[in-house]
Amino acid sequence: MKKRTTIIILIFLAVLFGGALYYLFQKNQQSPIVYKTEKAEIKTITKNTVATGKIVPKEEVLIKPNISGIIEEVYVEAGDDVKAGDLIAKIKVVPNISSLNGAQNQVQTAKIDLDNQLKLYNRQKTLFDKGVISANDFDVAETSYKQSQQNYRAALQNVEIIKTGTSKGMANVAQTMIRSTVNGMVLDVPVKAGNQVIESNNFNEGTTIASLADVASMIFEGKLDESEVGKIKLNLPLEITVGAIENKKFSAVLDYIAPKGTEENGAVQFPIKGTLDNKENTFIRAGLSANASIILEKADKVLAIKESLVQFDEKTKKSFVEVEVGFQKFEKRNVTLGVSDGIYVQIKSGVTKDDKIKVWNQAVE
């Protein structure tokens, strides 16, 4: 029985030993890892951040009336090109009953005074012609009569203005005919015939009849997160992409960064603006959504490698790469890095264009 057990143990050990020898043999037969290499390239590297926003006119003019009334007729519609002085709309004045009644009472009062002064004037003139009164007394009567005439005319004119919004001799400042104050395109006409409008004055903004703008002068208006705003500065170049205009990018210059941010959804956003350089005069509609790529740093046609080729010393934290000096033989080279876009990084020193750099993190097959 002991003999059989011993034989079984010896056979087990022999099989185990043979399996170990076979494993070592197979392992030695595997090909050694052959590391791939890559060379540096000449590239233009751009480091940027992105802001979201929209395209709006640089200056938008709101046309408002300076008299209250009802829109009688509208002469333009959105999309029309207008020049300064062109008619926008016509307003029909609806007189205020109280004001009109007061003005008519003033006319009657002025007429009574005028009739009385005319009688006095005629009486004084008769006496003056007979030599009874002096020229000075006659001049006083004549002056009073002329003042009464002027007051009567002013009262009549006031009634006419209340009724119609204008009067004779004031056609050049007629307030019922609303005209464009600038050259540009009509962006919006928020009113139509029959709408009531309120005049613009010190106490009221007034009703907007039309909004105009020069669509050839547009800006990007967007917002940037607080984590990015510290990286930008005025006059940085922008690359604008408009969602509605495919395969086209517009250049711009950052010319405004808000000194104060606003909190939105738990994050602080800072408004920014950039003036578009639309050299090709592409028609861009106001209000279109757009993204602005803000170029923080740019290196034109520099030596660059993939960031994945760069390693960092655990002790010194310095960057280095491994350069092939013989077949599958590599040496460590310290490198000085420059601008990075997250994929490629500029190499200022350490390697040349002809050096073969080890792909140290390649997948092992």
Image (cartoon, rainbow, N blue to C red):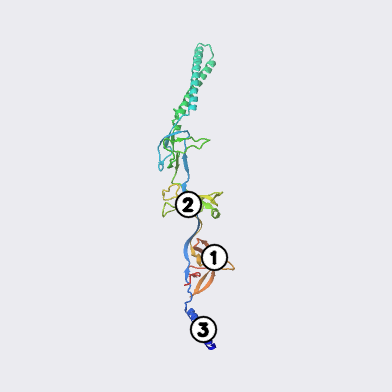
Disc 1/disc 3 C-alpha distance (Å): 60 Å
What's the residue at 47%, 41% (across, down)?
61
- Residues packed near mark 3 inside 10 Å, few (<14), some (14 to 19) or many (20 plus): few
Query: Which residue matches tag 3?
Result: 12
Q: Residue furthest front?
A: 1
What's the residue at 53%, 62% (across, down)?
338
The vertical placement of 203 against 38, above or below, is above
Q: Residue furthest bottom?
A: 3
Camera-near label (2 vs 3) is: 3
Looking at marks 1 and 3 on the same chain, the residue that comes earlier in the sequence is marked by 3
Q: Residue furthest right?
A: 315
What's the residue at 47%, 65% (across, down)?
41
Callout 1 amino acid: Thr
The image shows residue 134 at horizontal and vertical percentages of 54, 14
The vertical placement of 224 against 155, above or below, is below
Element assignment for label 1: strand
Element assignment for label 3: helix
The image shows residue 143 at horizontal and vertical percentages of 52, 19
- Residues packed near mark 2 inside 10 Å, few (<14), some (14 to 19) or many (20 plus): many
Callout 2 amino acid: Ala
The image shows residue 91 at horizontal and vertical percentages of 43, 33
Query: Which residue matches tag 2?
Result: 252
Camera-near label (1 vs 3) is: 3
Looking at marks 2 and 3 on the same chain, the residue that comes earlier in the sequence is marked by 3
- Residues packed near mark 1 inside 10 Å, few (<14), some (14 to 19) or many (20 plus): few
- The numbered mark at residue 336 is 1
Q: Nearer the viewer, residue 291 or 353?
A: 291
Disc 2/disc 3 C-alpha distance (Å): 80 Å
Callout 3 amino acid: Phe
Looking at marks 2 and 1 on the same chain, the residue that comes earlier in the sequence is marked by 2
